[in-house]
Image (cartoon, rainbow, N blue to C red):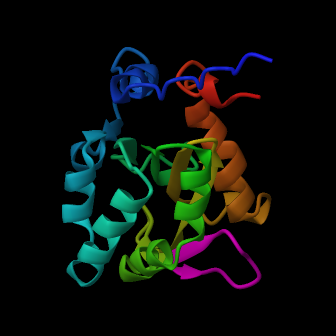
């Protein structure tokens, strides 16, 4: 039986281009703005340098060990605090690794947990996937900013959000981020994720 050649990892530019409709002024309301500092293409070195100092060295080693290749992110902000939107801020980023096994190992590594903790997050009570840290929403109310990590084959998606307390009365925050918000971004990512579809 002939060996099937592994599909190549999509280029960072493929993800950036695919996400463009979500940042194009022609498609996005004027009161939704892009947070430039956390949007775009980032190298492994840039990601490690941006980590909290206490864990930066360990995180750099973690990325190197699992063959990290790049990160592409899009971070959107409800600039005018428009109450018609369910969020204050939503963020989606994708990290490319050497292969799916490397992505799995990255997610299970204690150094990723240490990074998440250093960034102010703690695991939500009763959850194995949702991390929370205190943040202020548009109304100035202290709420839990959520983060989940989702594996997509050789890719790891990080989905974060500050959302209105009202929506959490009908949808659990973990579900909102890992399903609803993830789909909001991933509806545009079928092409770059194609190599991981089985």
Above or below: residue 111 compared with residue 179? below
Which picture quadrant has residue 2?
A: top right
Of residues 185 and 94, the one nearer the viewer is 94
Q: What residue range appears in magenta?
A: 122-132
Residue shown at the point (57%, 73%) measured from the top left: 131
User: Measured from the top left, where is residue 184 in percent x and y?
Assistant: 60, 35
Above or below: residue 5 compared with residue 98? above
Residue shown at the point (80%, 18%) measured from the top left: 1
Quadrant in which the C terminus is drawn: top right
Res 153 visible: yes
Above or below: residue 124 compared with residue 105? below
Residue shown at the point (62%, 22%) measured from the top left: 194
Side of 139 relative to 191 (left or right): left
User: Measured from the top left, where is residue 97 in percent x and y?
Assistant: 46, 46
Of residues 171 and 74, the one nearer the viewer is 74
User: Measured from the top left, where is residue 158 in percent x and y?
Assistant: 51, 53
User: Measured from the top left, where is residue 66 in percent x and y?
Assistant: 44, 56
Res 143 visible: no
Residue shown at the point (58%, 58%) measured from the top left: 149
Q: Is residue 124 magenta?
A: yes
Of residues 108 and 64, the one nearer the viewer is 64
Which picture quadrant has residue 30?
A: top left
Q: Is residue 3 magenta?
A: no
């Amino acid at each position: 039986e002939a060996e099937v050649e592994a599909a190549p990892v999509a280029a960072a530019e493929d993800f950036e281009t695919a996400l463009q409709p979500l940042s194009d002024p022609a498609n996005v309301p004027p009161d939704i703005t892009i947070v430039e500092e956390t949007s775009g293409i980032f190298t492994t070195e840039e990601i490690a340098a941006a980590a909290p100092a206490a864990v930066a060295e360990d995180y750099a080693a973690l990325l190197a060990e699992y063959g990290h290749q790049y990160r592409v992110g899009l971070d959107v902000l409800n600039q005018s605090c428009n109450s018609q939107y369910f969020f204050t801020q939503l963020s989606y980023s994708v990290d490319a690794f050497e292969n799916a096994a490397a992505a799995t190992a990255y997610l299970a590594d204690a150094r990723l947990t240490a990074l998440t903790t250093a960034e102010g997050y703690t695991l939500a009570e009763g959850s194995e996937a949702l991390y929370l840290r205190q943040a202020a929403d548009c109304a100035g109310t202290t709420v839990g900013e959520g983060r989940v990590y989702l594996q997509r084959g050789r890719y790891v998606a990080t989905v974060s959000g500050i959302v209105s307390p009202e929506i959490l009365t009908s949808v659990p925050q973990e579900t909102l981020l890992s399903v609803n918000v993830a789909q909001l971004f991933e509806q545009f990512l079928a092409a770059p994720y194609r190599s991981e579809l089985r």
